[in-house]
Image (cartoon, rainbow, N blue to C red):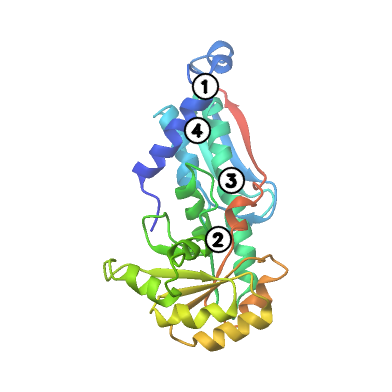
């Protein structure tokens, strides 16, 4: 699943309106209308590039006369000094759009870069790295694309996509004394057969009760490595096993080696630093 032009416009358009609600006062006053410029998007550091379509849209939506040539594909590893894209167009438009375009490219490339580090850390295991819903409100669709560009995978996109019962849900549905297995079965009977059901557990002794209900995925939350191994053995092939909580670049390899299928990492989106990219502009001389 890739970002569509319509999705890109829906995010970039409001960002441009936010940054220049009544126009760019500086550029419209001090930059001649006839001036044209060429700008290069350049990486200052090693990383993984993401956000080319969003970067280009910032300029195209500001002025249709802008042209953006992408030199590096999303998901590519990049090096310091490498040119990622070239922008040509009216100098006013290039200057007006540069901050929005850079903000998106830096944010998405930062996420892609961090994701690739996690993916590389678990190489050779069966575990896939996935994101979470800990995303920036309004930017989830871009941040999820950046995770994919970094070689990771997406968890459910929204609360509407799949069932995930966490500890608070479980406390509510068993409050009347109903067993966990029965409470899950009773509620699942109302779901379409195509709906994926995941249940979070935080103790080993919950696993069999959840398995008995016939769920699709069991999330082992904040388990020790020994308990993860025990959980994987207990579940076998009866459900997908996801590990969550306490995941960092220092711990992710050991977690993957317990045999889990999925490792969800909130840090991919909530803690990724922006990648250092720059836009070097040169005024075109007639």
The quarter in which the N terminus is drawn is bottom left
198 versus 84 height, above or below: below
Distance between the alpha carbons at the discs numbered 2 and 1: 33 Å
CA neighbours of label 4 inside 10 A, class few (<14), some (14 to 19), many (20+): many
Residue 150 numbered tag: 2
Which residue is outermost to the right?
Answer: 250
Q: Residue 25 appears in which quarter of the rendering?
A: top right
CB of mark 3 within 8 Å of CB of mark 2?
no
Q: Residue at x 51, y 54 (%)?
A: 133
105 versus 286 height, above or below: below
Residue 174 numbered tag: none
- Disc 3 designates what residue? 107
Distance between the alpha carbons at the discs numbered 4 and 1: 11 Å
Q: Nearer the viewer, residue 16 or 77?
A: 16
- Disc 1 designates what residue? 92
Distance between the alpha carbons at the discs numbered 2 and 4: 28 Å
Residue 88 numbered tag: 4
Q: Nearer the viewer, mark 2 or mark 1?
A: 2
CB of mark 2 within 8 Å of CB of mark 1?
no
86 versus 24 height, above or below: below
Residue 230: x and y, percent?
A: 60, 86
Of mark 3 and mark 1, the one earlier in the sequence is 1
Residue 141: x and y, percent?
A: 45, 49
Which residue is outermost to the front?
Answer: 177
Distance between the alpha carbons at the discs numbered 3 and 1: 24 Å
Of mark 3 and mark 2, the one earlier in the sequence is 3
Of mark 3 and mark 4, the one earlier in the sequence is 4
Q: Is residue 21 visible?
A: yes
Distance between the alpha carbons at the discs numbered 3 and 2: 13 Å
Of mark 2 and mark 1, the one earlier in the sequence is 1
Dot 1 falls on a residue whose secondary structure is helix
Dot 4 falls on a residue whose secondary structure is strand
């Amino acid at each position: 699943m890739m970002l569509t032009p319509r999705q890109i416009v829906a995010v970039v358009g409001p960002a441009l309106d936010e940054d220049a609600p009544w126009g760019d006062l500086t550029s419209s006053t001090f930059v001649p209308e006839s001036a044209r410029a060429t700008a290069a998007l350049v990486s200052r550091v090693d990383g993984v590039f993401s956000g080319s379509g969003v970067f280009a849209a910032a300029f195209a939506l500001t002025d249709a006369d802008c042209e953006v040539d992408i030199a590096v594909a999303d998901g590519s590893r990049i090096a310091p000094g490498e040119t990622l894209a070239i922008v040509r167009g009216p100098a006013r438009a290039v200057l007006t759009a540069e901050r929005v375009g850079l903000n998106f490219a830096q944010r998405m490339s930062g996420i892609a870069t961090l994701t690739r580090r996690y993916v590389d850390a678990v190489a050779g295991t069966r575990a896939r790295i996935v994101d979470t819903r800990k995303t920036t409100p309004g930017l989830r669709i871009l941040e999820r694309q950046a995770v994919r560009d970094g070689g990771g995978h997406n968890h459910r996109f929204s609360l509407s996509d799949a069932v995930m019962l966490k500890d608070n849900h479980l406390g509510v549905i068993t409050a009347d004394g109903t067993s966990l297995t029965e409470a899950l079965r009773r509620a699942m009977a109302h779901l379409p057969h195509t709906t994926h059901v995941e249940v979070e557990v935080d103790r080993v002794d919950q696993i069999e009760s959840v398995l008995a209900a016939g769920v699709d995925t069991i999330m082992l939350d904040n388990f020790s490595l020994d308990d993860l191994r025990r959980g994987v053995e207990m579940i076998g092939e009866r459900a997908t096993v996801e590990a969550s909580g306490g995941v960092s670049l220092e711990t992710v390899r050991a977690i993957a080696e317990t045999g889990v299928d999925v490792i969800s990492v909130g840090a991919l989106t909530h803690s990724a630093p922006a990648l250092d990219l720059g836009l070097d502009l040169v005024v075109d001389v007639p």
